[in-house]
Structure formats: C-alpha cells, structure tokens
Image (cartoon, grey):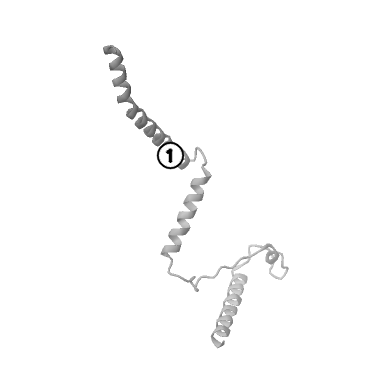
Amino acid sequence: MSVAGGLRLLVGRALKPLQRQFLRILAGLAFVLAMCLHTAGQIHLPFIDQLENSLYDSRLNLTLKGAADESVVILDIDEKSLALPELGRWPWGQDKMATIVDTLLSGLKKTKARAWKH
C-alpha cells in the first residue's frame, strides 16, 4: 500500500463521523427552518397545530380548578331567536337584552332552588 493510499484510507475513516454529524446538523437546520417558516405563516404544518392544540388542552386540564365556574353563563342567540317577531330586528335594544338576561337569571335561580330541594 502506498502512502497516498494509506492517507486516503485514514482521511476516509476520519470523515465518516463528520459525515454523520453533518447529516444530523443538516436535519436539525431543516427542522428549525421549517418551524420558523410555519411560525411566520409562510408554510402550514397541520401536525404542529394538532400538537399545539393537544398541549394547550393538557395544560388547561392540569391548571383548572376542577368544576366549571357557575357564575359564567353563555347565552347563545341562534337564527330561530333572531327570527322571532316579538323580539324585533337585530340588534336588540338594551331594554330587550336586559329582559332576556333577567329571564335567564330567574330561570337559573329556580333551577338551583329545585336542585337544592332534591
């Protein structure tokens, strides 16, 4: 074996770990670039959105106090309600909204009173 052949073999052996590291670095840079482009809105990666939503749900489940807050009530006004002639055209005035809220709250108080009796 000549000196040049031995040198090539020695350099080849030394470069194999560098080639593996280069591939790892290249893959890491490609991943970081993809994440940056997704964050900037240049590309859309659906699995990132799914992962983010799952992590958000998990974080909320871990940090919530337990039961839902009874002081929060969601009033959903649907198309059927908007079409009722006695309520008039949307947007409703403050007087109608106040009547709706009062009716809702009185219904909730009755429901709670029934729940306490049973």
Question: Could you tell whether 15 is left or right of 100 in the image?
Answer: left
Between 21 and 104, the one lying in front of the other is 21
Seen at 37% across and 33% down, the residue is 25
Horizontal side of 14 relative to 43 (left or right) equals left
Q: Residue at x 48, y 50 (%)?
A: 51
- Using the image, determine if residue 89 lies above or below residue 6: below
Callout 1: helix, strand or loop?
helix
With 71 as the anchor, is 27 left or right in this view?
left
The image quarter in which residue 8 lies? top left
10 Å neighbourhood of mark 1: few (<14), some, or many (≥20)? Answer: few
Q: On the image, numbered disc 1 is attached to which residue?
A: 36
Q: Which residue is outermost to the front?
A: 1
- Between 107 and 28, the one nearer to me in the picture: 28
Above or below 51: residue 34: above
Amino acid type, callout 1: Cys
Furthest residue toward right: 85
Name the quarter where the N terminus is drawn: top left
Residue 88 figure quarter: bottom right
Horizontal and vertical percent position of residue 33: 43, 36
The residue located at (44%, 40%) in the rendering is 35
Provide residue 112's location: percent of width, then percent of height. 55, 81
Q: Residue at x 58, y 85 (%)?
A: 114
